[in-house]
């Protein structure tokens, strides 16, 4: 009996078997999506094999598949193998893994046509490379040409020419009939990079991120399999694209936590890159001016090869960084201290451009009743409502709840409030008052409502239509604008003392990265940083661009407290709308873990149960348990946790090596 083995995007790690109706007997089915009945539901599944001689069990009647969704194969041997590895590594079913790799939402176009290309002339400039660039290119080229699975970290200061090394490496892959995936951490960078890649490589380049339609994504899948597309630049999900001759994977700004998915399966695109590079005997290249502690540690343990690029092109000086202590200077009229205001004024007078960074959107992080000092909180989350002035409303940045403003104080009924703290709208308002004739572009999640915005900001700053770029961490990554001479950090302390072991690392990275956006051409760069803690080691080492000293201090702290890279971490989050029930089940899970550990010799530390940093989120209370130990042992214990019966309306989420412990 001939049947189809199907896996479904449900939390059951097993295959299901379906027969083929007479009407579909002549169609190819393997490695395509199929529509099937499952219980009383209608689901999209993945046909991973055809079994010619299936031994049917007595009294079990198999159902027919309903339809075959794809005319062409949408899976490959590698993708199926990867889904099995994902299932084992991130504690999900193979079907859930495949739904992440090849989304069930991909729409088949009525007619599969060639991907539309604009006509553009290929431009291949012949740059004089630095000694460090040449060394990096030679080592990467050698591995690509000889099919050697090598992993490289390019540790290069901002402006050292990492992008040109990436492009030369991609050229080598193409010249050797191989393809390349180029991952970026932020959608805002894609217009800049897609422009560079299309100029260099023409119509074999495609763009992949959440803004690309499901129909267009299907066409890109098809074009990759036909060999029309050989290079894809995109966000983390591009790591799954079905290249069969993959020669190179580049992960730029590898330190960014956007490469980690928080939802199930909580995969890390960097780990997927290593797996695929190994499977294909190809090369993975990670690049950053501020590598993650774990990645840099991997170079010292020889897991990766280190390629250093310590100087800017033409040995241009790095921008000077000056700390402005807010303990000594009290801000009263404006969010800008006098030294920062004067520096902006001088830069604009010289017709230079300025980047202003504050990692907080809205107008003010909170408002407080003038009468009784009550802070207005979100009814769904245990956080303050953020005041937005344009248009005027209160908004929760976690669940999206909005209120009109003004409103009555829930405690005393008073309608008068005062705002506390500063966010990007307030900074923009101050800039417009101080520099009324200056054009400003604000880039944050409130203004970046479509992919066109990213193109507008890139082209607007590049053409000098705008003199000031103001924004959240979107402005810290990858931008290369030759007229930017000044970077101002309005408040460096937003991430410094969060209750997370990576908070110092993130602060060091943010300051170093945003500093690198200026002084990249012929204009000398200057960076001003407002902070209450100028002596903090993360800020002090960032001021010196001294990554290695920061790493040495940070790695000692990690070693003393047993944090990655000296162990692996898992975070179990329990959720319920009733706080008491959440805590009750969290304590039950903790006790279960203790019992499991008592019956083994595993060296796993348990922390908790403790309230999550934000206890209430989207109307549910959250408690968490942290496990610290070796991944293999943690996984075995967590697999047993997944068998626990959940109380009514209680949910459990398990994250391996989470991006934070908040």
Image: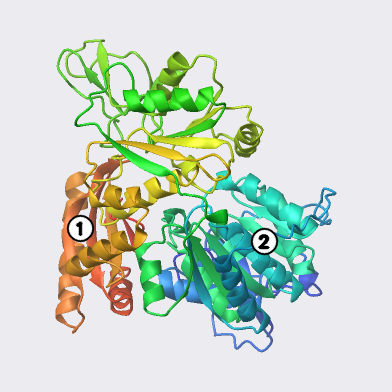
Secondary structure type for disc 1: helix
Position of 388 with respect to 557 (left or right) is right
Q: Which of label 2 and label 1 is nearer to you?
A: 2
Question: In the rendering, which numbered label is found on residue 586?
Answer: 1
Residue 296 x %, y %: 39, 68
- For the residues marked 2 and 1, what is the alpha-carbon distance in whole angstroms? 60 Å
417 shown above or below 122? above
Residue 86 x %, y %: 48, 71
For mark 2, does the 10 Å Cα neighbourhood hold few (<14), some (14 to 19), or many (20 or more) residues?
Answer: few
419 shown above or below 143? above
For mark 1, does the 10 Å Cα neighbourhood hold few (<14), some (14 to 19), or many (20 or more) residues?
Answer: many
- The answer to whether one can see residue 646 in this image is no
Q: Looking at the image, which residue is at 43% across and 60% down?
A: 264
Q: Looking at the image, which residue is at 54% across and 19% down?
A: 438
Residue 396 x %, y %: 36, 32
Work out which quarter of the rendered image holds the N terminus and state it: bottom right
- Colour convention of the picture: rainbow
Between discs 2 and 1, the one toward the N terminus: 2
Position of 323 with respect to 58 (left or right) is left
Q: Looking at the image, which residue is at 18% across and 66% down?
A: 561
Front one among 589 and 175: 175
Question: Mark 2 = which residue?
Answer: 128
Front one among 255 and 124: 124
Q: Looking at the image, which residue is at 15% across and 75% down?
A: 595
Question: In the rendering, which numbered label is found on residue 596?
Answer: none
> Across the whole image, how many numbered discs are drawn on residues?
2
Residue 69 x %, y %: 71, 61
Secondary structure type for disc 2: loop
459 shown above or below 496? above
Could you say which quadrant of the image residue 465 lies in? top right
283 shown above or below 310? below
């Amino acid at each position: 009996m001939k049947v189809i083995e199907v896996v479904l995007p449900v939390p059951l790690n097993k295959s299901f078997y379906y027969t083929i109706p007479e009407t579909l007997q002549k169609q190819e089915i393997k490695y395509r999506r199929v529509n099937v009945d499952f219980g009383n539901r209608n689901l999209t599944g993945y046909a991973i094999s055809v079994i010619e001689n299936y031994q049917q069990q007595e009294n079990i009647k198999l159902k027919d598949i309903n339809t075959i969704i794809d005319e062409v194969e949408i899976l490959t041997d590698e993708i199926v193998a990867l889904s099995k590895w994902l299932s084992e590594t991130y504690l999900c079913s193979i079907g859930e893994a495949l739904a992440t790799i090849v989304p069930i939402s991909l729409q088949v176009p009525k007619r599969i046509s060639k991907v539309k290309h604009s006509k553009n002339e290929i431009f291949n400039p012949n740059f004089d490379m630095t000694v460090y660039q040449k060394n990096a290119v030679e080592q990467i080229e050698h591995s690509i040409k000889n099919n050697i699975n090598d992993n490289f970290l390019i540790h290069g200061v901002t402006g050292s020419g990492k992008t040109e090394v990436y492009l030369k490496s991609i050229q080598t892959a193409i010249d050797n009939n191989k393809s390349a995936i180029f991952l970026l951490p932020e959608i805002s960078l894609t217009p800049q990079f897609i422009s560079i890649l299309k100029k260099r490589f023409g119509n074999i380049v495609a763009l992949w991120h959440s803004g690309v339609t499901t129909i267009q994504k299907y066409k890109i899948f098809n074009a990759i399999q036909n060999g029309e597309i050989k290079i894809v630049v995109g966000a983390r999900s591009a790591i799954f694209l079905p290249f069969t001759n993959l020669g190179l994977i580049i992960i730029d700004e590898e330190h960014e936590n956007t490469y980690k998915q928080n939802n199930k399966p909580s995969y890390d695109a960097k780990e997927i890159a290593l797996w695929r590079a190994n499977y294909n005997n190809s090369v993975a290249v990670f690049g950053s001016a501020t590598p993650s502690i774990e990645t840099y540690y991997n170079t010292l343990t020889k897991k990766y090869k280190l390629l250093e690029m310590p100087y800017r092109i033409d040995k241009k000086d790095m921008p000077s960084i000056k700390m402005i202590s807010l303990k000594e200077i009290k801000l009263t009229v404006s969010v800008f201290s006098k030294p920062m205001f004067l520096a902006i004024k001088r830069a604009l007078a010289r017709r230079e451009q300025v980047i202003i960074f504050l990692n907080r959107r809205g107008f003010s992080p909170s408002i407080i009743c003038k009468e009784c000092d009550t802070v207005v909180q979100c009814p769904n989350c245990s956080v303050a409502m953020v005041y937005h002035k344009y248009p005027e409303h209160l908004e929760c940045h976690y669940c999206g709840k909005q209120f009109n403003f003004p409103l009555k104080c829930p405690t005393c009924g008073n309608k008068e409030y005062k705002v506390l703290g500063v966010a990007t709208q307030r900074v923009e308002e101050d800039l417009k008052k101080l520099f009324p004739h200056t054009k400003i572009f604000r880039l944050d999640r409130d203004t970046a409502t479509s992919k066109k915005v990213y193109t507008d900001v890139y082209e607007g700053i590049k053409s000098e239509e705008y003199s000031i770029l103001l924004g959240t961490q979107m402005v810290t990554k990858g931008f290369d604008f030759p007229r930017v001479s000044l970077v101002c950090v309005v408040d460096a302390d937003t991430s410094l003392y969060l209750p997370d072991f990576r908070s110092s690392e993130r602060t060091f990275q943010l300051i170093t990265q945003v500093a690198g956006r200026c002084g990249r051409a012929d204009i000398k760069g200057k960076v001003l940083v407002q902070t209450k803690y100028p002596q903090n080691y993360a800020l002090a080492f960032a001021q010196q661009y001294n990554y290695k000293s920061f790493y040495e201090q940070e790695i000692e702290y990690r070693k003393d407290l047993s944090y990655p890279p000296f162990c692996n971490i898992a975070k179990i989050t329990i959720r319920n709308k009733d706080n008491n029930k959440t805590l009750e089940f969290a304590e039950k899970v903790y006790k279960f873990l203790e019992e499991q550990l008592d019956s083994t010799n595993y060296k796993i530390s348990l922390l908790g149960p403790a309230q999550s940093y934000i206890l209430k989120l989207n109307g549910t209370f959250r408690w968490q348990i942290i496990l610290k130990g070796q991944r293999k042992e943690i996984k075995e214990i967590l697999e047993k946790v997944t068998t626990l019966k959940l109380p009514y309306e209680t949910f459990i989420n398990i994250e391996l090596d989470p991006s934070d412990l908040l």
